[in-house]
Image (cartoon, rainbow, N blue to C red):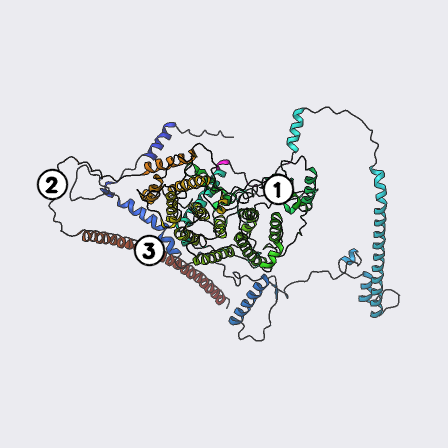
């Protein structure tokens, strides 16, 4: 065996030398380099195209054309896009219809091409691509009950039968049977075998069933084992093992969406608030009308249940326990008492009235719907901004009953209204200005009266909608306040729009009837007692009226507009007199139900005009007129708290009040406004109240006062000062803010403040201090400082020996574009020529290649023909030799 020679090792120097040769820059052939000449050589200027490499550039261009132009040339008459053009594939038809359509198309095509003249040919039926004539039958015609012997499995007849039938049985001495006898014998034997086989099968089934039934009894004996009972004490597990097993086998939660982090939640809340604020500002500026209203799709089976609105308040589901009590605690304050879903009416004497409390609990358990309704309608209405929605379901009692009419708005403000309240450092809350203080009655009497009402409260749970106003009056007549509330609540629940198709229109009529009912209540308020009772009723039922307005918003708009029109027509009959209390109540309800900060509103804008007309034309002749005017000014302050607008009539009315508080003398006559001439001196305070403490809220029961008392004068002055401060706060962004209040400030400076309490004096001083600090006086415009004199730069034109045309800038730009177009056109023509030459070379190469292939094929055919001819000649020569 020969010795294997070792391979020659490659040295390290050789490897490094090879790498250097690869990395070394290829030396250019000087004959392949083209030097571009320049007319004018500029020193230090880098020229991009100073030297060119025609060979390399040409190779790059050819390579690029091979990847682009050559591929386009190859695919110029081809389509490489797959399109499904099968018949009925893009139509939404069943699969069977597609197959039938394709079969019909194939038949029509075949008929038009091949079978148009062949009328005798029948249709060839196929199955899975094969004709039925070509399919071979390999199925066994024998049944399963036939004999399973090998002889019969092969499909052959018995040897004895074949011997007798085919050869006649001549070798045997038996009598020869006829063919009929043989066939009868064959049939008889076949039936006999089938009967025997069936009998064996039935016996097998019977034995199997018997074995199954007996096996159930044997299983107990087989599975029974003699196991020794061993009571081995198991070792106590370690604490670590217990914890590990608990963690291992504890229930695992299913996969769900991940929880949002605190920054994400805060960001979403911020975006939501910004969006709501932006919408409110757009409506305030009047831009919201330009936005096209989005039309929501409504399906044919829509139940019109889109009355539920989103709200920021916590929503609780109303459920009941085993004892019939509500699981949701809803509390409200009513005349100093707390009424809750599962709580009793508590008063100061609850220790002595335990029996009454127990009876009250029984009545409430029988009627769980006595609970004050949760404010689940606190979502935003389309026209009601977020600051005009209802309060949370934890406090729905409106203080308009026993405390105030004007502060009822606070119970229907949402989170955005809280922003207005947070600005109280700049302006006082409106509920601190006006409040209806109800004279205190003995609590014992009130509680006893309400308890008796609750005990006697046996109302039906289902109420139908009233057909007319008289039927509603019959239902509510002689009913207590809480009974009327419960009746209205159940009437809305039993006739909800989601329950029936016509309930929405019926609830719209109920809303109209309730407005008429409120109008009749306050129109008949002749004294303060009746008025306070009606206010208490209104505060109790107004959440449900608000719910009716949300269920049918369009009807609520139209109804309020009609009410305001009717009240305005009645007022026009006596323009110089202040209207009744019912008009003030409806204007207050407008501020609760609708957005007052919109630039234009279907209901609020006419109310603005109505209030200005009353303040401008009505004469102040009594205490009631003065209180009505102050009430209207307070409403205007509420309406303009967010929009920062102003109503000139309110400022003039406050100026008239200040004029009434100025002592008059004949030496210095003071011009009194026309509407205040009859009471020009009635607000002058003569008594000293500087050391007395007064309440800071105005009592609306003063509407029924007949004379000006000193306490009333102080209250009126305090309210007027605070209203003026609020109006100045609203107008602080206007350039004419100081001129608007010139008349009111002039009268206010003449009012002697030494007799008024300290609260009034402080508001007075603060009002004027803010006014003086906000005034900006006109000044001469400051002159700009003169710049230093500098020498103008001397620009010397460089002469380059070229003549340039003197033409306009547009002409110069046009010439540049034309020159650039000409240059690009030349380049494009050059590239087209090169493309054409490239395609020409491709075509000539294809032509040469095809000619060569054709010549080779022809030569091959000629050679084969020559061989064949030579063989034929040789065959002829041999044939001649034989002859």
Mark 1 and mark 2 residues within 8 Å of each other at the beta carbon:
no
Residue 615 visible in the picture: yes
Mark 2 and mark 3 residues within 8 Å of each other at the beta carbon:
no
Residue name at image x 39 percent, y 56 percent: 74
Residue name at image x 85 percent, y 56 percent: 199
Disc 1 target residue? 446
Q: Sequence-wise, which precedes: disc 1 or disc 2?
A: 1
Q: Secondary structure at mark 1?
A: helix
Magenta segment boundaries in residue numbering: 251-263
CA separation in Å, label 1 and label 3: 109 Å
Q: Secondary structure at mark 2?
A: loop
Q: Residues within 10 Å of mark 2 (few under 14, many from 20)?
A: few
Q: Nearer the viewer, mark 2 or mark 3?
A: 2
Mark number for residue 839? 3
Residue 28 falls in image quadrant: top left
Disc 2 target residue? 796
Nearest the viewer among 382 and 458 is 458
| Image: 72 above or below 378 | below
Q: Sequence-wise, which precedes: disc 1 or disc 3?
A: 1
Q: Sequence-wise, which precedes: disc 2 or disc 3?
A: 2
Q: Secondary structure at mark 3?
A: helix
Mark 1 and mark 3 residues within 8 Å of each other at the beta carbon:
no
Residue 258 lies within the magenta run: yes
Mark number for residue 46? none
Q: Is 307 placed left or right of 23 in the picture?
A: right
CA separation in Å, label 1 and label 2: 105 Å
Residue 734 visible in the picture: no
Nearest the viewer among 147 and 15 is 147
């Amino acid at each position: 065996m020969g010795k294997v020679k070792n391979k020659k090792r490659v040295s390290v120097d050789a490897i490094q030398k090879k790498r250097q040769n690869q990395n070394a820059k290829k030396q250019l052939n000087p004959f392949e380099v083209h030097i571009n000449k320049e007319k004018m050589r500029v020193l230090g200027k880098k020229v991009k195209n100073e030297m060119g490499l025609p060979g390399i550039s040409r190779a790059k261009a050819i390579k690029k054309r091979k990847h682009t132009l050559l591929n386009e040339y190859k695919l110029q008459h081809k389509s490489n896009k797959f399109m499904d053009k099968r018949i009925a594939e893009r139509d939404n038809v069943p699969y069977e219809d597609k197959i039938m359509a394709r079969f019909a198309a194939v038949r029509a095509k075949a008929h038009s091409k091949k079978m148009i003249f062949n009328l005798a040919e029948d249709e060839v039926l196929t199955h899975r691509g094969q004709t039925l004539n070509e399919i071979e039958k390999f199925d066994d015609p024998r049944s399963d009950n036939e004999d399973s012997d090998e002889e019969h499995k092969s499909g052959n007849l018995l040897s004895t039968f074949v011997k007798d039938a085919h050869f006649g049985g001549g070798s045997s001495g038996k009598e020869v049977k006829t063919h009929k006898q043989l066939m009868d014998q064959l049939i008889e034997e076949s039936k006999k075998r089938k009967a025997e086989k069936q009998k064996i099968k039935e016996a097998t089934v019977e034995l199997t069933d018997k074995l199954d039934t007996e096996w159930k009894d044997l299983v107990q004996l087989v599975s029974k084992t003699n196991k020794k009972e061993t009571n081995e004490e198991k070792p106590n597990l370690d604490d670590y093992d217990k914890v590990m097993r608990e963690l291992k086998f504890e229930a695992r939660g299913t996969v769900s969406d991940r929880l949002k982090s605190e920054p994400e939640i805060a960001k979403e809340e911020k975006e939501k608030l910004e969006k709501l604020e932006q919408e409110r500002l757009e409506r305030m500026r009047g831009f919201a009308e330009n936005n096209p209203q989005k039309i929501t799709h409504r399906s044919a089976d829509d139940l019109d249940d889109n009355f539920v609105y989103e709200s920021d308040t916590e929503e609780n589901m109303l459920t009941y326990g085993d004892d019939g009590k509500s699981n949701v605690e809803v509390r409200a304050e009513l005349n100093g008492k707390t009424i809750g879903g599962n709580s009793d009416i508590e008063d100061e004497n609850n220790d002595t009235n335990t029996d009454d409390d127990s009876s009250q609990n029984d009545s409430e358990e029988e009627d769980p719907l006595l609970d004050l309704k949760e404010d689940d309608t606190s979502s935003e209405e389309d026209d009601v901004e977020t600051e005009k929605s209802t309060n949370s379901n934890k406090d729905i009692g409106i203080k308009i009953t026993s405390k105030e009419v004007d502060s009822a708005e606070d119970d229907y403000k949402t989170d955005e209204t809280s922003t207005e309240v947070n600005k109280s450092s700049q302006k006082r809350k409106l509920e601190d200005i006006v409040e209806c203080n109800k004279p205190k009655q003995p609590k014992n009497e009130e509680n006893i009266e309400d308890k008796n009402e609750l005990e006697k409260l046996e109302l039906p749970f289902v109420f139908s909608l009233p057909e007319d106003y008289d039927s509603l009056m019959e239902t509510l007549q002689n009913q207590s306040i809480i009974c009327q509330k419960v009746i209205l609540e159940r009437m809305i629940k039993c006739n909800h729009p989601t329950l029936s198709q016509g309930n929405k229109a019926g609830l719209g009529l109920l809303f109209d009837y309730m407005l008429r009912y409120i109008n009749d209540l306050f129109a008949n308020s002749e004294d303060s007692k009746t008025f306070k009772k009606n206010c208490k009723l209104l505060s109790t039922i107004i959440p449900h009226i608000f719910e009716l307005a949300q269920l049918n918003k369009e009807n609520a708009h139209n109804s309020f507009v009609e009410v305001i029109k009717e009240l305005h027509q009645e007022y026009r009959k006596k323009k110089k007199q202040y209207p009744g209390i019912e008009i003030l109540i409806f204007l207050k309800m407008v501020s609760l139900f609708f957005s007052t900060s919109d630039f234009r509103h279907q209901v609020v804008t006419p109310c603005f005009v109505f209030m200005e007309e009353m303040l401008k034309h009505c004469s102040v002749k009594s205490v009631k007129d003065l209180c009505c005017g102050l009430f209207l000014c307070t409403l205007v302050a509420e309406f303009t708290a967010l929009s920062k607008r102003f109503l000139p009539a309110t400022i003039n009315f406050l100026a008239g009040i200040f004029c009434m508080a100025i002592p008059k003398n004949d030496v210095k006559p003071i011009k009194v406004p026309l509407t205040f001439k009859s009471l020009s001196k009635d607000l002058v305070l003569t008594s000293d109240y500087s050391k007395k403490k007064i309440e800071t809220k105005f009592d609306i029961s003063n509407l029924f006062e007949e004379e000006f008392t000193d306490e009333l004068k102080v209250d009126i002055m305090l309210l007027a000062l605070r209203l003026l401060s609020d109006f100045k706060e609203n107008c602080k962004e206007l350039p004419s803010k100081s001129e608007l209040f010139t008349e009111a400030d002039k009268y206010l400076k003449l009012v002697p403040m030494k007799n008024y309490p300290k609260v009034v004096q402080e508001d007075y001083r603060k009002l004027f201090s803010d006014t003086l600090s906000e005034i900006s006086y006109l000044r001469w415009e400051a002159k700009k400082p003169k710049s230093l004199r500098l020498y103008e730069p001397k620009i010397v034109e460089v002469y380059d020996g070229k003549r340039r045309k003197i033409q306009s800038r547009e002409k110069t730009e046009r010439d540049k574009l034309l020159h650039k177009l000409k240059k690009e056109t030349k380049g494009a023509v050059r590239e087209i020529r090169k493309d054409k030459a490239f395609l020409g070379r491709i075509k000539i190469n294809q032509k040469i290649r095809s000619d060569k292939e054709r010549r080779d094929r022809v030569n091959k055919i000629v050679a084969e023909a020559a061989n064949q001819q030579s063989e034929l000649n040789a065959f002829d020569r041999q044939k001649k030799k034989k002859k």
